[in-house]
Amino acid sequence: MRSNLAEKEIQKDSSGVIALSGLSHKTGGVDLREQFALKEDQYPLALQEILQGSDVSEAVVVSTCNRVEIIAATDSSAGERFTAHVEDVLEKLSGLSRGKFRENLYHLRGESAVGHVFRVASGLDSLVPGEPQILGQLKSAFALAHEHGATKTLLNHLFQRAFGVAKSVRSRTEIGKRAVSVCYAARELAQKIYADLSKQRVMLIGAGEMGTLALKHFQSAGAHQFFLANKTLSRAADLAGEVGGVALGLDAIEEFLPQADIVIGAATLERGMDALLTESMVREALQDRPGQPQLLIDLAVPRNFDSAIGQLNDAFLFNVDDLEGVVQENLETRRGALDQAELIVGEEVLKFLSWMQRRSVEPVIKQTLEDFDHLRSEEVLKALRRLDRGALSAEQQIEIEKVIEQLSQTLLAKVLHQPIRVLKAQATEDPQLLEIFREFFKR
Amino acid sequence: MLIEENSLVRAHVVLIISASVLFLLSFVMSLAVILQESQLKKKQFGFFQRRLPPLEILDRLNTRVVHVGFWTMLAAIVLAVMSEPHITLTDWFENFGFVVSVLALIAFAILEVARFRFGYRGRRAAWLTVAAFGLFCLSFVGVHLFSGATHAF
């Protein structure tokens, strides 16, 4: 489905350079970034504004909580004009004067722009290295731009390659392998003890934001048997309605405790209040479930669970510090994987640039060959006309034409072979070569 | 009686070898359970903890292997006794190797009761398994060093 943008088709040279401008969590705080946050219905306008630039033939806008970036295919000479145009567009979209954000913008072209897109897609530029959400966000941004006719060959290929690179980085390195949030670490921990979370019963104490997030992680891992305990029963009931489970008041925790394999503590306690779960409560619960361990994850501060619970044989108790330790260790592992990921990105950038070069070189070679073949045919005809063929038989005439045709084709092929060979081999390293070739063989 | 001549002896040999393999497997799994659970208890998430299967799987598998091993060993001992009808029970219990084998079997029986009746699991059951396996290994030594004619091949 194409929108008005496609109907206002601008015939521009799409064989140009990738340019990228934007700001991210590295260059601007959230109070600045939120000024540029785009809603979905604002995307077509943003794309339209960018494509109005005389040098811009394709564009994608990426707007997330951590970055706003404009990726475009521009003429090779666009440079500062594109930068100025982007500032105009951002000024218009945000209502801020450019002086307030100019210093926070970064501008990349060519190889660095391509590398940046690949790195962003792979999660290497994210606040948490290897986080997977950015890939989905890039895919949505690209799909929107494509739907509105704002992308053509260059950006189509760039983004498809970026998605492939992201997949490669994630599969070949440890960049996305371990939990880097406390709630996700809780889920991973449970999976170290229980093979199949769908068979485990989870009790959540405290149906606030943290507790709900942890519950959702467990739900996504397959858990579906929940006991939801909250001080306000109606809130527990609401959550039970959402995820499917049994709503409990805090006074019913002890009764249902023996049935829970995993207990998550996320209730807000006042300082000085007693722990919600004591060692004796858990010991009695374990006696009612012989041979079945119990995992207790205390996400709250002040803690919900008595630390003495950890001494019990079949109870595994973890608090938020323990999980933070897991998260920090995992972050270190991810950071350690950055170098390997950068190598993969580097290789892919070279492959992409090589593709771009071939893409710009081959039409020129093809056109040159066509032009010279046309010239050759004209000269062959002229030569044949000058021949006195009156005395020749029909077969002799055909033979002469064949010989002259073959001679001219062979001569042309041999003359052009070396220049074309050099162009194909060296245009990647020396972009000027293409221009020189064009000039040399211009007709 | 030579193994070639007595099918009971042959069956005993097959069963005792099977039991040995099963108990060796349970020994290795018990070590893994001990390691995994210790690391979880100490909240250490090191090299082994990341690579070992979930604790529940290790423990469940270990239970099954010991269970099958126990009955296999029991059958092996019964067949051994049946294969030598001329040896009285008193004579059997004068044989060091036999006694240690029975003790090993009792150790595994205790382990079974501890698991199924008293809910022993994890590290506790694993340590019991390791101890029972130790006795089982001793029974091997005892049987071959002290059994004399009954294990002559």
Image (tube, coloured by chain):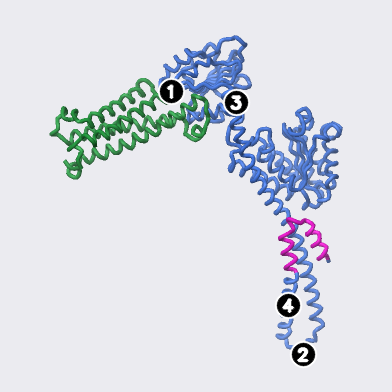
Chain colours: A blue, B green
**Is residue B64 at least partly visible in the picture?**
yes
Identify the subunit bearing mark 3: A
Q: Chain of mark 4?
A: A
Marks 1 and 2, how far apart at CA: 109 Å
Chain identity of mark 1: A
Which residue matches tag 1? Answer: A292
User: Does residue A158 sit above or below A235 in this rendering?
Assistant: below
Label 2: few (<14), some (14–19) or many (≥20) C-alpha neighbours in 10 Å: few
Q: Main secondary structure of the magenta part?
A: helix
Tags 4 and 2 in contact by the CB under 8 Å rule? Answer: no
Residue bounds of the magenta highlight: A416-442
Residue under label 3: A324
Q: Name the amino acid, label 1.
A: Gln
Residue drawn at (19%, 40%) of the image: B152
Which sits earlier in the primary sequence, circle 4 or circle 2?
A: 2
Disc 4 target residue = A407
- Mark 1 touching mark 3, by CB under 8 A? no
Q: Residues within 10 Å of mark 1 (few under 14, many from 20)?
A: some
Tell me which numbered mark, 1 or 3, is placed earlier along the sequence: 1
- Residue type for callout 2: Ala
Percent of width and height locating residue A308: 50, 15
